[in-house]
Image (cartoon, rainbow, N blue to C red):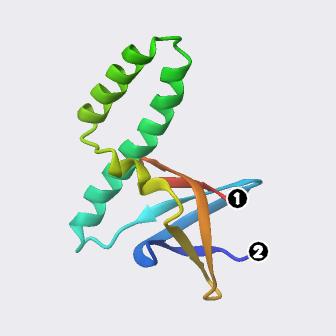
């Protein structure tokens, strides 16, 4: 099995991948940014919030709130997490990994965690 070594966003290099783990159908890895690029870590924090919002959205649906209450809570959470509607598309099909052998693969259902790890569907 080939091991992914780099993470790309919109086909631009973002970070190195370390401690790769795979268990069908999900894979995970730690993300290591170049310390010279502080923007990348700020961007990663935004991605963590996008992942959180995705889970919050599911939780909100299960509360049985009216549509108006649900939308109010949802909008409040967006503001709390400093996210825009456009930011919510950041976890869509824009992510790629590069393997040790130089091949690339698009990845899906990516989730970002505060401990600088990610999980995705292979």
Kindly identify the residue that appears in the image at 32 percent across and 73 percent down. Answer: 34
Q: Residue at x 56, y 73 (%)?
A: 97
Which labelled disc corresponds to residue 37? none
Q: Secondary structure at mark 1?
A: strand
Q: Residue at 53% across / 22% down in the picture?
A: 61
Q: Which residue bears the numbered disc 2?
A: 1
**Residue 116 seen:** no
Q: Position of residue 71 (x, y in %)?
A: 37, 23
* Crowd rating for badge 2 (residues with CA inside 10 Å; few <14, some 14–19, many 20+): few
Left or right position of 111 against 85? right
- Decide: is 68 above or below 92: above
Kindly give the residue lying farthest to the front in the view shown.
Answer: 68
Task: Place residue 38 in its image quadrant.
Answer: bottom left
Taking depth in this image into account, of 94 and 45 the one nearest to the observer is 94
Helix, strand or loop at label 2? It is loop
Spatial CA distance of label 2 from label 1 is 10 Å
User: Is residue 72 found left or right of 121 in the rendered image?
Assistant: left
**Depth check, front residue: 37 or 121:** 121
Q: Label 1 belongs to which residue?
A: 22
Q: Earlier in the sequence, mark 2 or mark 1?
A: 2
Image location of residue 90, percent across then percent down: 41, 56
Is any part of residue 108 visible from this angle?
yes
How would you rate the neighbour count of disc 1 (Cα within 10 Å): few for under 14, some for 14-19, many for 20 or more?
some
Q: Position of residue 116 (x, y in %)?
A: 42, 54
Mark 2 touches mark 1? (CB < 8 Å): yes
Left or right of 86? Residue 89 is right
Residue 89 screen position, x and y as percent: 43, 53
79 or 27, nearer to the observer: 79
- Residue 69, quarter of picture: top left
Residue drawn at 46 percent across, 78 percent down: 11
């Amino acid at each position: 099995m080939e091991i992914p070594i780099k993470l790309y966003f919109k086909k631009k290099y973002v970070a190195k991948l370390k401690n790769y783990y795979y268990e069908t159908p999900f894979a995970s890895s730690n993300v290591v940014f170049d310390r010279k690029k502080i923007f990348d870590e700020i961007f990663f924090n935004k991605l963590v919030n996008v992942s959180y919002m995705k889970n919050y959205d599911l939780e909100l649906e299960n509360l049985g709130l009216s549509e108006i209450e649900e939308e109010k809570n949802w909008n409040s959470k967006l503001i709390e997490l400093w996210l825009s509607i456009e930011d919510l598309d950041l976890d869509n099909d824009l992510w790629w990994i590069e393997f040790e052998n130089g091949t690339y693969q698009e990845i899906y259902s990516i989730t970002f965690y505060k401990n600088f790890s990610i999980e995705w569907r292979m």
